[in-house]
């Protein structure tokens, strides 16, 4: 299963073929089943073949990680708040102000059932399985961000694709720097949950405010 030809086929099926089919009009339950099967396969390969420890929260470089967050997060807050204020002011902080239970539910579901699986697949699995395909770190990050963006095609929203491509670059750099699923998941959750907080959740597929 570590043969290069096998891994190339695996990459093509998991990161190109399946995401490209998601915008197609076929039963949602079929998409969910295929997604669950794919994710279980990824976890199995990581644990049994690659011998990766998925929950590595101890002895992590917390201080440099939080310093990185304190540099990037204010930029994210400023740019996204300005964007919502300029283009959709009626959405600004709508959910946390109007429906706190829904807001907390969104944060929980997104963090547990979206962020963590995404980082397992697109960072831990991707870099472990395909990192040796690339001699250039820049190309590795670019391809990772591209396939991460491709996974969001089903939203059919240009802004979502732009955000996920930028996010893919940021999260890819974080993972390469710290080699930790835990840390990159926390970072992803912080930025993603902020988008729901500021009022951009609806464009990312979560409930917010009616148009």
Image (cartoon, helix red, strand yellow):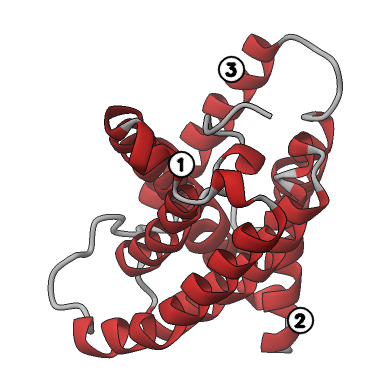
Judged from the image, the secondary structure of the residue bearing numbered disc 1 is helix
**Label whose residue precedes the other's in the sequence (3 or 1):** 3
Task: Give percent across and percent down for residue 104.
Answer: 29, 37
> Residue 35 is drawn in which quadrant?
top right
Residue at the spot of label 2: 139
Q: Say whether residue 153 is visible.
A: yes
Q: Earlier in the sequence, mark 2 or mark 3?
A: 3
Of residues 166 and 53, the one nearer the viewer is 166
Comes first in the chain, label 1 or label 2: 1
**Residue 76 place in picture, x, y as percent:** 51, 73
Quadrant in the picture for the C terminus: top right
Q: Residues within 10 Å of mark 1 (few under 14, many from 20)?
A: many
Residue designated by label 3: 33
- What residue appears at the point 85 percent right and 16 percent down from the top-left corner? 25
- Residue wearing tag 1: 94
Q: Position of residue 132 (x, y in %)?
A: 65, 76
Local crowd size for mark 3, using a 10 Å CA cut-off: few (<14), some (14–19), many (≥20): few
How far apart marks 2 and 3 lie (CA) works out to 32 Å
């Amino acid at each position: 299963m570590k043969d290069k030809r096998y891994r190339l086929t695996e990459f093509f099926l998991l990161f190109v073929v399946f995401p490209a089919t998601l915008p197609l009009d076929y039963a949602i339950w079929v998409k969910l089943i295929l997604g669950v099967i794919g994710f279980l396969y990824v976890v199995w390969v990581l644990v049994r073949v690659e011998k990766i420890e998925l929950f590595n929260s101890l002895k992590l470089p917390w201080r440099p990680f939080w310093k990185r967050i304190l540099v990037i997060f204010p930029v994210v807050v400023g740019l996204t708040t300005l964007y919502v204020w300029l283009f959709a002011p009626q959405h600004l902080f709508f959910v946390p102000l109007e429906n706190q239970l829904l807001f907390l539910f969104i944060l929980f579901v997104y963090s547990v059932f979206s962020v963590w699986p995404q980082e397992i697949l697109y960072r831990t699995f991707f870099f472990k399985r395909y990192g040796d395909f690339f001699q250039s770190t820049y190309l590795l990050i670019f391809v990772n961000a591209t396939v991460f963006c491709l996974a969001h095609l089903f939203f059919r929203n240009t802004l979502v694709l732009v955000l996920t491509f930028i996010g893919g670059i940021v999260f890819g750099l974080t993972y390469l720097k710290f080699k930790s699923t835990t840390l990159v998941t926390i970072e992803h959750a912080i930025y993603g949950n902020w988008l729901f907080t500021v009022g951009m959740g609806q464009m990312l597929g979560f409930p917010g405010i009616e148009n």
